[in-house]
Image (tube, helix red, strand yellow):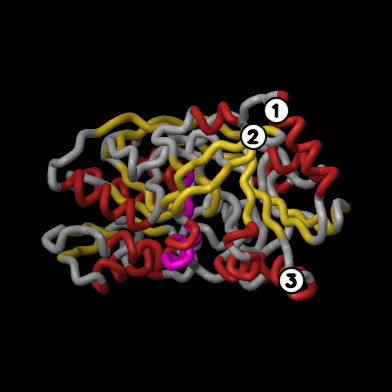
Amino acid sequence: MVVNPIAGMGGRVALKGTDGPDALRIARERGATPLAPDRARRALGRLDPGTRVLAAPGPMGADLAHAAGLAWEATDSAAGGDRPNTTALDTRNAVAEMSRRGVELLMFAGGDGTARDIHDAIGADVPLVGIPTGVKMHSGVFAATPDAAGAAAAAYLRGAVALQDAEIADVDEDAARRGRVATRLYGSARVPRQPALMLSAKAPTLAADAGLEALCEQLARSLDGLTLLGPGTTTARIAQGTLLGVDAALDGELIATDLGEAGLLSLLDSHADATLILGVVGGQGSLLGRGNQQLSPRVLRRIGCDRIHVVASAEKLLRLSPPVLRVDTGDEGLDAELSGYIRVHVAPGRTIVMKVST
């Protein structure tokens, strides 16, 4: 067990990640708080009681394994795990020791950057299950939710499932902050073969079809009141906003871009009847919880589940396996409210009904 305690801190404050000391400093200045420990705790709660855990020290895993009541011991490496600010080297040292000691499975809490650090240290020597904690998670080593990560790990350790290859990829954070998506494949790993629990790697962006283009043009002409638009190439076409941020339009005019949670809540204070338009992450089917953590449970509850609309190309939806849209807001009650079925708009006057689940 390895936890990156700072993973995901940039999401709600509209940063594209927390790789590097400057990004972490800015995140804290904007009021960001750690999310990884709570999400790791949820995953550990799904392991079988007899599971033995070799954990990185302190907040990098051992503290959580102890609190979960599991049999555990800490690695000798990564002494920096007891520091408030851990580093990529701490992660690499810890997982290298775990590999040497023959662990059966490495469960980690972090994002694509943490997956890269693990790959740099041990390659594909140990099967992985990623607890989704980062801002950007384009790699195929992450479970759909923290609970799914624990369930997938438990099933594998019981010998109930086989392994399959998965990609480790990452986005250039500097390019992302400038609104450009630059994803690079770094390697591969092995993960439990559990399509209901483990998400695929993010698929490349598809060229928009004529129906989707016409839909975006129609929506652009009909925007009324306050409309919030999630990240993605599809939603960016509607209001000509940012590619990777959450933007706001009032009566069709773009009034704010790349908003964090605080900015969104401020807008919602003065506009009670807001609408949210979301796209779908290709290959993963994610609606909420991947790259749009600014849309926090507080923001989503203020908007209301009935005022969330989804747009995507029909081809993107048909390529999903399994054909499910995913929500992982961090609030289990809200995730349950969002689950069920939703009509996804794919062209003017045309929708496809999709299942929504955690």
Answer with left or right where residue 159 lies relative to residue 322: left
In this view, the residue in front, 309 or 108, is 309
Q: Residue at x 50, y 53 (%)?
A: 134
Q: Nearer the viewer, mark 3 or mark 2?
A: 2
Specify the segment rendered in magenta: 325-335
Q: Residues within 10 Å of mark 2 (few under 14, many from 20)?
A: few
Q: Residue at x 33, y 38 (%)?
A: 195
Q: Amino acid at mark 2?
A: Arg
Residue assigned mark 3: 272
Does label 3 or label 2 sit earlier along the sequence? 3
In this view, the residue in front, 7 or 244, is 244
Tell whether position 190 is magenta. Answer: no
Q: Nearer the viewer, mark 2 or mark 1?
A: 2
Does label 2 or label 1 sit earlier along the sequence? 1
* Total marks in image: 3
User: Mark 2 and mark 3 in contact (Cβ < 8 Å)?
Assistant: no
User: Mark 3 and mark 1 in contact (Cβ < 8 Å)?
Assistant: no
Q: Amino acid at mark 1?
A: Gly
Residue assigned mark 2: 350
Answer with left or right where residue 234 lies relative to residue 284: right
Does label 1 or label 3 sit earlier along the sequence? 1
Tell whether position 330 is magenta. Answer: yes
Point out residue 218 in the picture as x, y percentages from the top left corner. Answer: 79, 39
Residue assigned mark 1: 211
